[in-house]
Image (tube, rainbow, N blue to C red):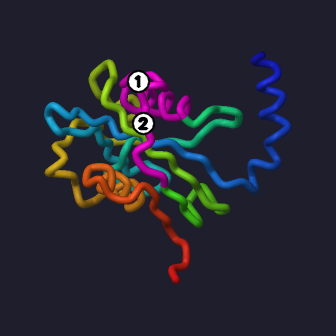
Amino acid sequence: MSQQTDERAHSLKPALESMTLLVAAVIVHDKATNRVVLLQRSENAKFARGLWDLPVGKSEPGEPITETAVRELYEETGLTVKPEALRVAHVIHGAWGVEAPNGFLTVVFAAHEWTGEPENREPRKHSQVRWVDTDTIPEAFVDTTASALHHYLNDGAAVSLDGWPTA
């Protein structure tokens, strides 16, 4: 099966360059303490240097978006969640992004069950990873994911558009 997946990913490669980038983000929310796990991008990050963000990352070819969320959360924070425990919290459709000239679609999941304690597993990309009280979310935050987090915490809109013309 893995050979078939590898062949499929290879055959899709040219098409991927013109596709909308698929991204997953995870809001790990401890409802008992009303805290969320956030990371601060390092000065070496490709974009949004020094800004706070959710654990977030790009989907690999042939990878289900829930697996992207699980993988990226673990790679960045060491936290483990089960795909079936993820709930869609918000969707962001961007017209353009630094690594997405053809736009991006970010599915933001909420996780209320996890194992492990947050740690900075990618110090080259992030200067810190930690629990933050939802009443003290830093203002220096990546715009799109800040909006998604705000909507999630305040039962707001389920979809955000970023960079699209307004009527």
SS for callout 1: loop
Q: Give the image location of residue 133, x and y in percent.
A: 16, 43
- Start and end of the magenta stretch? 66-91
Please name the amino acid that badge 1 sits on: Val
Q: Residue 81 carries which label?
A: 1
> Image point 38% across, 62% down: which residue?
143
Which label's residue is closer to the chain start, 2 or 1?
1
What's the mark number on residue 87?
2
Q: Distance between the residues labelled 2 and 1?
A: 11 Å
Amino acid identity at mark 2: Arg
Q: Does the magenta stretch include residue 74?
A: yes
For marks 2 and 1, give the one nearer the viewer. 2
Which quadrant holds the N terminus? top right
Relative placement, left or right, of 38 versus 134 is right
Residue at the (42%, 40%) spot, across then down: 109
Q: Quadrant of residue 5?
A: top right
Residue closest to the eye, 102 or 107: 107
SS class, disc 2:
strand
